[in-house]
Image (cartoon, grey):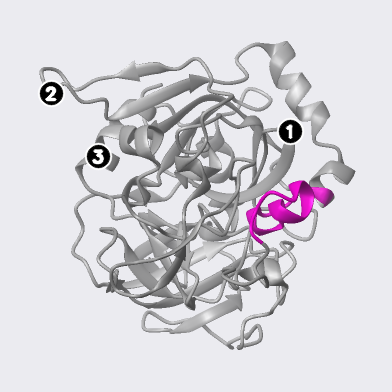
Amino acid sequence: MTSSLVLFAVASLVTGLAGVSPTGATVTEHPGRAAAAARAVQSLTAAPGSGETPVVEHAAARSAAEQRRVLDYWTPVRMARALPIDLLGTVTGTLRRPDAPGGSGAPGSRKAPAAPERRPAAAGPGTSTSGSRWTAGGLVGRTTGRVFLTLNGVDFVCSASSVRSANKDLVVTAGHCVKDGTGAWADNWTFVPGYDQGRQPYGQFTARRMFVAGPWSSSADDSHDIGMVALNARDGAHLTEAVGFQEIAFGSPRGRHTYGFGFPVDPPYNGEHLIYCAGPLRQDPHDQTRNQGLPCGMTAGSSGGPWFTGFDPSTGRGTVTSVSSFKYSNDQGTMYGPYFGDIAKNLYATAQNA
């Protein structure tokens, strides 16, 4: 399978393995492939007659007591201390240090991207930026939010987006923001839409059911690093009633101009503002995944943030066709996201009716 460097939220507490791809690119083995413990009880939704398991499901906070436990867990102090994935080695001492021989050179080395944060006066349909603060408001400012979760006893942050769904409660994010590949499911999972500098204008929505693509759960396949989470209502209101939703599509043409959003934490960012990248997509030059790459300097914490095609900067509306997933260690300027094809479509069909 692929040998990519997932930089942006959740990994198991295991040693990263350095290697070289067939194309000569230095890469790091995804920790989820080595995880063997702490596997949660899960239900499997199989395609009739296919012998495959396209969707893997996990029950989260279903009862009122469980929801209250999650909400009580995320105190302001815990939220402030939650980590992006590249700091995991600092916490556990188990991951290869980025500055060590053979290390990744990932954001964990605390090296800021070459380009500082930029603040364009206006974002247009053909805008290109590798990481600027979004100040135009609109729907994207409400539907995109931060995710707070616990995995293997460590608190982490990710990004996610509300999308159209039959249950009115669905968000899309990266698979590794929901489940550690072949390993554990996340706990204490909560979504904070419209987050800005600590403000939570719409409150927190806890997870009730979590879904990942089968290939992600069985082999940490980076081409299917996709997660979807059905949330509990808050004060009697569904998520989309509170913040709205973005459209989602599958099988879209490749190579289109795309906007990517998220809440990166590592310098020059601090996780407190919505950041965006924009530009044309390209294929994975190492042919290790079916993913596409977006010119983007966003750092750890942006994993799971939505990618839009047909995005209208004046309204903040678009169609979600991917999410931020990983970067190669020798190319910090390109973010890769999974292509939303048939497997993602099956995942959505199950999750939106949960």
Mark 2 or mark 3, earlier in chain: 2
Name the foreground residue: 304 vs 198.
Answer: 304
Residue at 43% x, 82% y: name it. Answer: 124
* Circle 2 SS class: loop
Residue at 39% x, 57% y: name it. Answer: 3
- Image-based side of 89 in relation to 240, left or right: right
Q: Residues within 10 Å of mark 1 (few under 14, many from 20)?
A: few
Residue at numbered disc 2: 50
Residues shaded magenta: 81-96
As shown in the figure, which amino acid type bears the numbered disc 2? Ser
Mark 1 or mark 3, earlier in chain: 1
Residue at numbered disc 1: 153
**Inter-mark Cα distance, 1 to 3:** 30 Å
Write down the quadrant of residue 104 in the picture.
bottom right
Write down the quadrant of residue 287 in the picture.
bottom left
Give residue 137's position: percent from left, percent from top. Answer: 59, 66
Mark 1 or mark 2, earlier in chain: 2
As shown in the figure, which amino acid type bears the numbered disc 3? Ile
**Inter-mark Cα distance, 1 to 2:** 36 Å
Give residue 74's position: percent from left, percent from top. Answer: 80, 36
> Given the current orientation, which residue lies at the most extreme left position?
49
